Amino acid sequence: MLESAAVMVALVVIGLPLLAYLAQDSLIFHPQPLTEPQRVAVARSSAAQSVFIDADGTRLHAWHIPGDPLVIYFGGNAEEVSWMLDEAAARTPGVGWLLVDYRGYGSSGGAPSEKALVADALRWFDQLKTRGKVYVFGRSLGSGVAVQLAAQRPLAGVILVAPFDSLVEVGKRHYPFLPVGWMLKHRFDSVALAPQIGAPLLCVVAMDDAIIPVEHAKRLHDAWGGPKRWVALEGAGHNSTDNAANYWTSIVAFLK
């Protein structure tokens, strides 16, 4: 009887973390692919250009709206970014946008990982043929990509919506029974990079965010090395930021 109980405890103590470790990619990334006919339909219905680049044999895609300044956009972990085309064009006339499809998302090939997404962000930046100002905009998971780009390339400013200090800290909050600190491969440790970044920050935070609670954004904001502005979206949750009255007005003011 005691041996059976010991076996059950061992299975829980070892098996549950092992299962979570093996499943973490599917827990973090939720690719939203577009079929080729869907991409063509979106391209026909918008003023955006469908742009492809090659990354060591992997075909990557982004949507480009010409304009100046240029904003490079990185979305959330379950976001297909073409939904932003009409919204961005309507809210920020004259501003250029590059809406990036992560690997496995939209019309990009490959599979997502922290290492790949950051390397691809650098590729997109280095591909830009613009002499104007370049901003980066990261939403939720995309904030982790945006911060790493800002730490390695010169930018006019950084817009972070529903950001976090590190994925490890967010994981500890949601999975206190797991050894998240040593098992997480995709760490997105933004708070470690923040003090060395001198670009201005606009930190837009949903005050009722249950997925990434406010304190995670606050730690990142407080650690930021450059000028910074905190925008609180009262009554907004993680997925309802855009409905807040001061959401787009804050972004437009920052870009100006």
Image: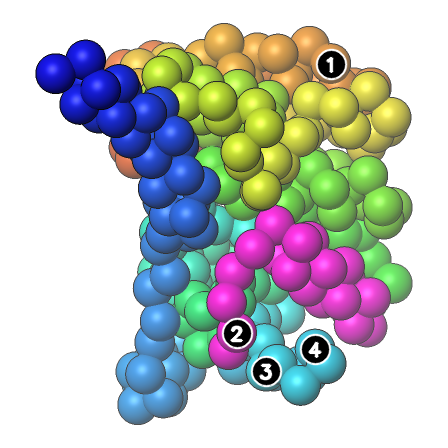
Disc with the residue nearer the chain's start (2 vs 4)? 4
Q: Are marks 2 and 4 in contact (CB under 8 Å)?
A: yes
The spot of residue 246 in percent (x, y) is 42, 24
**Closer mark to the observer between disc 1 and disc 4:** 4
Give the label on residue 116, or none.
Answer: none
Disc 3 secondary structure class? strand
Which image quadrant is residue 173 in? top left
In this orientation, which residue lies closer to the viewer: 227 or 110?
Answer: 110
One can see residue 205 in this view: no
Q: Position of residue 256 (x, y in %)?
A: 68, 38
Q: Which residue is mark 3?
A: 59
Image position of 49 with respect to 74: above or below: below
Residue for badge 2: 110
Q: Which residue is mark 1?
A: 223
Disc 3 from disc 2: Cα separation? 8 Å
**How many numbered badges does the structure rendering display?**
4
Q: Residues within 10 Å of mark 2 (few under 14, many from 20)?
A: some
Report which residue position mark 4 lands on.
55
Residue segment shown in magenta: 109-130
In the drawing, does residue 209 fall left or right of residue 81? left
Mark 3 vs mark 2: in front: 2
Q: What residue type is disc 4 on? A: Ala
